[in-house]
Image: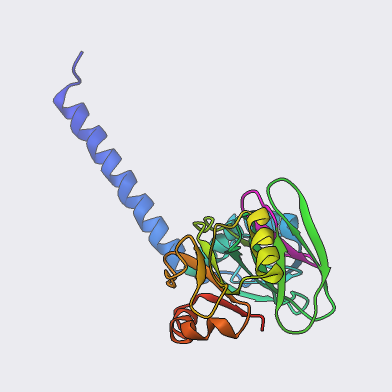
Amino acid sequence: MPLPPDLRRRLELIARAGALAMLAWMLVRSAAPRDTATVQERTDSQALSAALAQWTRAPEPTAVHVTAAFAPAAREREWLRALSHAGVRVTWSGDSIPATALEIAPRNDPAGGVRAYVSAPAGARATLSDAVGLLDTVSIAGGANVLALPMSAGAIDLLVRNQHSRASAPDSMLPRQAVVLGRAGWEGKFVMAALEERGWKVSSRLRVGPTVFVTQGTPHALDTAHTSVVIALDSSAAAYAGAIASFERSGGGVIIAG
């Protein structure tokens, strides 16, 4: 049943007046000075999450300070940024947080695996783990620390004290050949056998006489698109010196044995 016109007009006027009153109250409240409340918290991840929820509820503080034992999680960092954008002064300190860095690169190896480049304070104990579990535990030395990991599952996690650093495992490298250059003999034979047992595709050019060579595969393809490493066993590879130098400048690997 429709309402009478007079009653509808009265209800509309009441609703409009209520909305205007609510807007006026919100405007006055936003302009009024807020009570000063400085919150300082020494926290781990669990305590920080609880504190963030408390700081977000009214009455909100004007300034907050976080004393962190390790870097906050991404969700917590975004929450602190939102508080800062809302007018809260956000500061933090973390003198005990160790400076760490982690980079993961694929191994140029037919067996696969990755190489982990780890940086952390010298003497610190570091553990590397993946989605399955613990991979390795090492004592950090000064300078670069490189760890060869034969296999990994998912992202790699570096833990130093309470600080986690994570890096995604890269795609594996496409297998390319190894080229062996030198004189025919037991040395070339055993080098090629060892490479093939590892899973390498081996090309070679071995000298058996002043003008006689035994060739396997494509040893002339000295470019990084086809070849990973060139192994020069002796001075008979001197004829390839220019090509080997160009290959090395392009990022290829070179081993000179003799």
The C terminus - image quarter: bottom right
Q: Is residue 107 left or right of residue 7?
A: right
Q: Position of residue 194 (x, y in %)?
A: 69, 60
Q: Which residue is nearer to you in this view: 48 or 58?
A: 48
Which residue appears at 26% of the width and 44% of the height? 16
Residue that sits furthest to the top in the current view: 1
Q: Is residue 75 left or right of residue 121?
A: left
Residue 72 visible from this viewpoint: no
Q: Position of residue 110 (x, y in %)?
A: 60, 56
Q: How many marks?
A: 0
Colour approach in the figure: rainbow
The N terminus - image quarter: top left
The boundaries of the magenta stretch are 150-165
Which residue appears at 70% of the width and 59% of the height? 149
- Quarter of the rendering containing residue 126: bottom right
Residue 133 visible from this viewpoint: yes
- Quarter of the rendering containing residue 187: bottom right
Q: Is residue 132 left or right of residue 245?
A: right
Which residue appears at 52% of the width and 67% of the height? 228
Q: Is residue 115 left or right of residue 89?
A: right
Q: Position of residue 55 (x, y in %)?
A: 63, 60
Residue 122 in magenta stretch: no
Q: Position of residue 161 (x, y in %)?
A: 81, 68
Q: Is residue 22 above or below residue 40?
A: above
Q: Which residue is nearer to you in this view: 90 or 252?
A: 252
- Quarter of the rendering containing residue 6: top left
Which residue appears at 73% of the width and 70% of the height? 68
